Image (tube, rainbow, N blue to C red):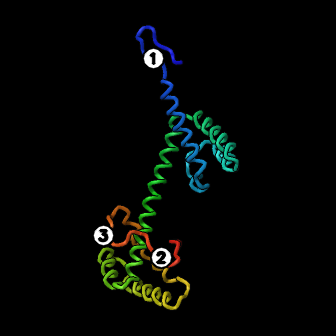
Amino acid sequence: MRGKNEDTGEFLGESRSAQRREALDVLALAQQLVALDPGRLDKLPLGDDLPEFIERARRITSHIARKREIAFLAKQLRREDDEALDAIRDALEVDGEAARIDAARLHRAEDWRERLLGDDGDAALAALLEEFPGADRQRLRQLVRNALAERKANKPPRAFRELFREVRALLQPADSQDDHFGEGDGDGDREGDDTTP
């Protein structure tokens, strides 16, 4: 129970509810850290001991034991100062935003590729070149022709993937641009392509 200042009548320290909310926030952070892949985890500003605790929680497969280990990790996180926890949260948010931007760019590149390979590919190519005047018209035409020939002959999608890489490279500096063509939504049949060029 928190004390009370006898002179002013104000409560000393945080209320139990505030302490519980803070503890639950740190527990959620611990769960998020355990769920991260090692590559992203390496980029976070973690202390010296935290990666070891995170790895130990990952290795545990029993549900109850894993839950207990994550609670222990949260306890270790609560020992860190507020600035360190804020830095970890900020890094996670930045990575999340970067991942969303990258995913949107990939979907946009896929949509352009599908438009280029569609029935009205010439109009799509003209629209792409209008939006990106520095694009190599001849290379794009050649990749579209080769990708269509691959589809027709049931060959491995080498040009199909190369076309994706070419369009994605055009979109790199265009992170913040709106979706100008608005036709595709990123869903649909990609003919077995898992967006891994």
Inspect the image, locate mark 3, and give the three-letter code of the amino acid beneath it: His
Q: Position of residue 149 (x, y in %)?
A: 47, 90
The residue depicted at 54 percent of the width and 38 percent of the height is 26
Q: Mark 1 highlights which residue?
A: 11
Mark 3 lies on a secondary structure that is: loop
Tag 1 and tag 3, C-beta contact below 8 Å: no
Q: How many marks?
A: 3
Q: Mark 2 highlights which residue?
A: 190
Q: Which mark is residue 139?
A: none
Could you tell whether 181 is left or right of 51 in the image?
left
Indicate which label's residue lies in the foreground, 3 or 2: 2
95 relative to 196, above or below: above
Mark 1 lies on a secondary structure that is: loop
The residue depicted at 58 percent of the width and 45 percent of the height is 31
**Of 194 and 8, which appears nearest the observer?**
194
38 relative to 132, above or below: above
Inspect the image, locate mark 2, and give the three-letter code of the amino acid beneath it: Arg
Q: Position of residue 134 (x, y in %)?
A: 34, 77
Q: Position of residue 14 (x, y in %)?
A: 48, 24
Q: Of callouts 1 and 2, which one flags the residue occurring earlier in the amino acid sequence?
A: 1
Q: Of callouts 1 and 3, which one flags the residue occurring earlier in the amino acid sequence?
A: 1
Q: Which mark is residue 180?
A: 3
